[in-house]
Each structure stands twice: as C-alpha cells, then as structure tokens.
Amino acid sequence: MYLKGPCGEKVGHYTDIIEENVQPDMASGTTIRWLIRKEDGAPTFAMRLFKVSRGGHINAHKHPWEHEIFVLRGRGKVRIGSREYAVQQGYFLYIPPNIEHEYWNTGEEELEFICVIPHSPTVPEEEVKC
Ligand code: MN
C-alpha cells in the first residue's frame, strides 16, 4: 500500500494503485492507473500511468488541456493533429490543448507511458487546424 505522510505527501509503487480499464468507447486494450490525483490533495496536476496492450488503441479525442507524456516501455504511434510520430521507450511528448490526438501500440510488447494533466481545463475550447 502506498504511504500518505504528515505533510500531505504520497509515496508508493505503481502496483499499489488500482489498474482500471479505459472505457471501450475511448480505447481498446488500455488500462489507466491514477498515481496522483486531485483527491490526494495535489492542487494542480494528476499523474496517470497508461498501459496499452499489443494491438491496442486509444481513440481520437481532444480537450482544452495539455498532455505531458513520457514513454516508459514499448513502441507506439501517436497522431497529433495531422502528423503521426513513431515513439518508443525514452521518448517524451507534449500535446497542446485542443489538438486532436490518438495512440496505437505498434510494438510486440505493452506500450506504457506516464501522462500528466491539470485537474481542470486550462484554455478555452477552440477549433485548431494544424
Ligand atoms: Mn487526451
């Protein structure tokens, strides 16, 4: 079990956090662990760990907040707007707000990445073409 300390800190191993399936209307073969969330007392950011199984996909979507991503394991393809990027272990990505994005696991093993988001939208919703 992870630890909650007297100053509000939270320390643990990722396996201490429940692994939840991402809803099938949003992704296939994908799980999420909310490592740090608003309910932990973190005032600004949530840190999530995603696992996309072999052949898995996270559907195209967009929202008025950014993603800051670090790839821990595996290989994938990420579409950001009109471009596609091949990524693998060690890659980082910044996906700006309001840009449509989607992800595929293109490798032979699981694709795992950290994705940090703010708790709330940070910019107005708008149509962006790029
Ligand atoms: Mn997203």
Image (spheres, rainbow, N blue to C red):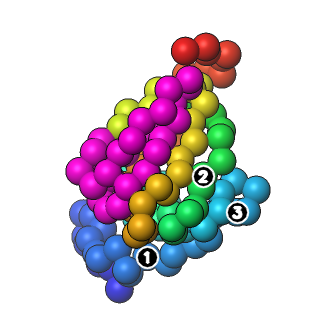
Of the numbered discs in the image, which one, if any, rests on residue 17?
A: 1
Q: Which residue is drawn at 33% across and 79% down?
A: 2
Q: Can residue 8 be seen in the rendering of this structure?
A: no
Q: Name the residue under label 3.
A: 23
76 within the magenta span: yes
Structural distance between the alpha carbons of marks 1 and 2: 21 Å
Mark 3: few/some/many CA within 10 Å (<14, 14-19, 20+): few
Amino acid of disc 3: Gln
Amino acid of disc 2: Ile
> Is 94 positioned to the left or the right of 102 in the image?
left
The quarter in which the N terminus is drawn is bottom left
> Is 115 positioned to the left or the right of 60 in the image?
left
Q: Is mark 1 within 8 Å of ligand 1?
A: no
Q: Is mark 2 within 8 Å of ligand 1?
A: yes
In this view, 47 is above or below 123: below
Characterize the magenta stretch by its predominant secondary structure.
Answer: strand
Structural distance between the alpha carbons of marks 3 and 2: 10 Å
Nearest the camera: 123 or 7?
123
Q: Name the residue under label 2.
A: 58
Q: Position of residue 35 (x, y in %)?
A: 40, 65
Of the numbered discs in the image, which one, if any, rests on residue 34?
A: none
Mark 2: few/some/many CA within 10 Å (<14, 14-19, 20+): many
Tell us which disc is closer to us: 3 or 1.
Answer: 3
Nearest the camera: 43 or 20?
20
In this view, 45 is above or below 106: above
Q: How many labels does the image show?
A: 3
Q: Which residue is drawn at 56% across and 25% down?
A: 81
Seen from this angle, which residue lies furthest right? Answer: 25
